[in-house]
Image (cartoon, coloured by chain):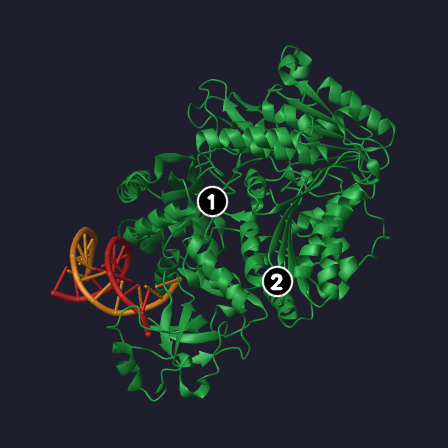
Chain colours: A green, B orange, C red
Amino acid sequence: MMWLEEVSKKPVASTNAPESLVQVAVAAPVRSLFTYAVPVDFAGKLVPGHLLEVPFGRGNRRGIMIGPGKTLQRPDVEMKAVSKLVEPDPVLSEAMIRTLLWAADYYLTPPGEMVFAALPPPFRRRGGSASQKRVWVVGLAPVTDLERIRELTNRAPLQADLVRVLEQAGEMDVSRLEQRFSGARQALRALEKKGLVRMRRKVKLRHPLTGEHPDASPVETLTADQQVSLDAITTALERRAYAAFLLHGVTGSGKTEVYLRAISHVVDRGQGAILLVPEISLTPQLVARVTAKFKSQVAVLHSGLGEGERLDEWRRLRLGQARVAVGARSAVFAPVQDPGIVVVDEEHDSSYKQSERLPYSGRDLAMVRAREEGAVVVLGTATPSVESFSHAERKRSTLLHMGERVHRRPLPEVEVVDLKKSLVDPVERQQTISPALASALAEVLDRKEQAILFLNRRGYSSFALCKDCGRSIRCENCSVALVYHRADQKLKCHYCGLNVPVPETCPSCESGRMQLFGLGTEKCEEEVRRRFPGAGVIRLDSDTTARRGKVHDLVSRFARGEADVLLGTQMVTKGHDVPGVTLVGVLLADLGLHLPDFRAMERTFQLLVQVAGRAGRGHKPGRVIIQTFLPEHESIVLATHHDFDTFVHKELARRQGLGYPPATRLLMVRVNHHAAEAASSLARQIAGMFRAASAGRVNVLGPVVSPLAKLRGRHRWQMLIKAPTVETLMLVARTVQQQIKVPAGAKILFDVDPQDML
DNA sequence: AGCACGCCGACT
DNA sequence: GTCGGCGTGCTC
């Protein structure tokens, strides 16, 4: 064979032992593995998972040894040798490598990208494991040569754009500019050469979380439901083989206690555990309970960790000093040694799916990892996703049900208020809190109890409208209306962050008669403070929690009873367990129902059941009031009865009828480009390729302009590929992916199992 | 992702 | 003619 002759000329690999050639996943967005020769220095020492440096293209790159090499992908190129073994011990286990290669394959993503996504960022960079994070920032040079900038407009439009942005914004992160302008880095380099901009490396400060180590809560006896579920899980753990469970426990049924005891079981026998949560900063109470129980055995993988700290946590896990990893989505890659159990809390939460740069589902990879590690996986939630439920129905996982709250506390009573009726009354029309909710809130305040108010929209009003021409003020980069924020009196875009003063006159017709419409959390807060002057109100949304640790701070203050009302967005629905809360108000339940997404009903149902579940967790029973314009809507009616079974079976039938998951499998392909025409024509071209490649085996819907037609200055088009099975989907998708040549300035995203259809 | 190669339009 | 920007293709 060709490659044997080639290799035998080199002194490094004289035999055909497996170590003479290795396959390497190189840190580059390239769709294949590469084969390298192994030099004598470490011949026979390389094992899968070793972090290497290899010559690649012009320079050197980091790479991971995947396994023995067989032959070159293309026999006509020259074989190169591994240049360096970076770390003496492998940084990935074989089970992790199998998981990651599976993921790269399934999510149609370059193996090198997937593999390095599982490692701390310093490992990817040459020069090793920096402990301080430095980023490149760029600003205009102090002496600006106006003559030369004007010159640029014709010759280099991209450079001219960048200069204009820098004039406005001052100093900016290079990586942020790159997100907005493709090719920004080369353009900036050119500008730097001309002396028009200045780049420097800036140290990014770390924000270590001050960790509380509370004492473990006293041991309580389990409910019958909890005991049955725990027994089923521990029986599976005893077998030390892959098994999957869907733990469906109503809100307040004590799922966390089941997780903790199951994790204890594996930790006691020397194994490790992974606990995934949707958003770690929103679940301080869960993190506190885990740390209380397992103390220094816990590694918390917080998104706010600095690079050095993250690396430290990573090392502690890899060395076996810590055995329990807690974190969001990416913690599925935590280097826990020999994990015996992987728990996914709130498995229905859509934040487990990353839908940008590198799309993958942390929940689904948790199952794959558990399979590869021979571990038990537990998906826990009060509102299982339709997919996971169907998975259990088809016996791919075991359904465990906990229908009763601890201490036999009742589920809260839910009432629905029809907002259509309040439209008739001129006073009520102006208010976001209906008379029914207002009187319930007054009672709660009287009794010195607490309330949670939920409104899934931040800001003050949802848009500013001109009373003469009827146009709303829109974002210049995105196809959305700007939202008025009263705190800083600005109009903001919730997608790109654009922040502009409110114009005196209408930008379209010069009329001075602008008016604010709609509601957001800011306006609601104002109304609560006005109508209930004595009440202490805490607002929880991404505006009040922008600073690190702020969520934890505000939630703990509310939990300690320092405020009477917690008012906010999605954040108030997740995970907190505040015994004093006896009232939950949903200000506008139908907000999510109008989204063009086949999961809109499922999301609404989950959201309502979850938020309702925050009420009545203490000794006193809870009450829930849902305000809506659609009181007879199925997902609202069934949520008021906490009726998951009816909901899921109706939803399954509906999905079957319409051909949506889990009845089918989906791939979304999204194209984006600065130029609208380029985006649409490329999308049409790709859709054509799908139709040609599919030969009728898959259904190609679209292309259509994305519901969010423009985002951060880029026009978006998308298509949905519907296939009867994964195999068919993969086959067709791979065929098309190989044919596509990405034109300059375009971005194409293949999103397998899309969650976010906007 | 980088980087070389090569085409093409704007200027000394 | 030359210079530099920008599209295209390749990396064991």
Residue nearest the viewer, comparing A375 with A39? A375
On the image, the x and y values in percent for residue A426 come to: 65, 11
Gap between marks 1 and 2 measured at Cα: 31 Å
Which residue is located at x 44 percent, y 57 percent? A104
Q: Relative to A89, is A578 on the left or the right? A: right
Q: Quadrant of residue A680?
A: top left
Label 2 marks a residue whose chain is: A
Near mark 1 (Cα within 10 A), the count class, few <14, some 14-19 or many ≥20, is some
Counting residues from the start of the chain, the first of labels 1 and 2 encountered is 2
Query: Mark 1: which amino acid?
Result: Asp
Q: Give x and y (percent) for residue A365.
A: 54, 54
Q: Along the line of sight, which residue is nearer the eye, A352 or A270?
A: A270
Label 1: which secondary element: loop
Could you tell me residue A324's position as x and y percent? 68, 62
Q: Of the residues shown, which amino acid type is indicated by label 2? A: Gly
Q: Which residue is mark 2?
A: A306
Determine the secondary structure under disc 2: loop
Q: Nearer the viewer, residue A11 or A370?
A: A370
- At horizontal 37% and vertical 34% (from top left) the residue drawn is A705
Marks 1 and 2: same chain?
yes
Query: On residue A753, which mark appears?
Result: 1
Q: Quadrant of the N terminus of chain A?
A: bottom left
Please name which of the two marks, 1 or 2, marks the residue nearer to the observer.
Answer: 1
Identified at 49% across, 63% down, the residue is A98
Q: Indicate whether A517 appears above or below A497.
A: above
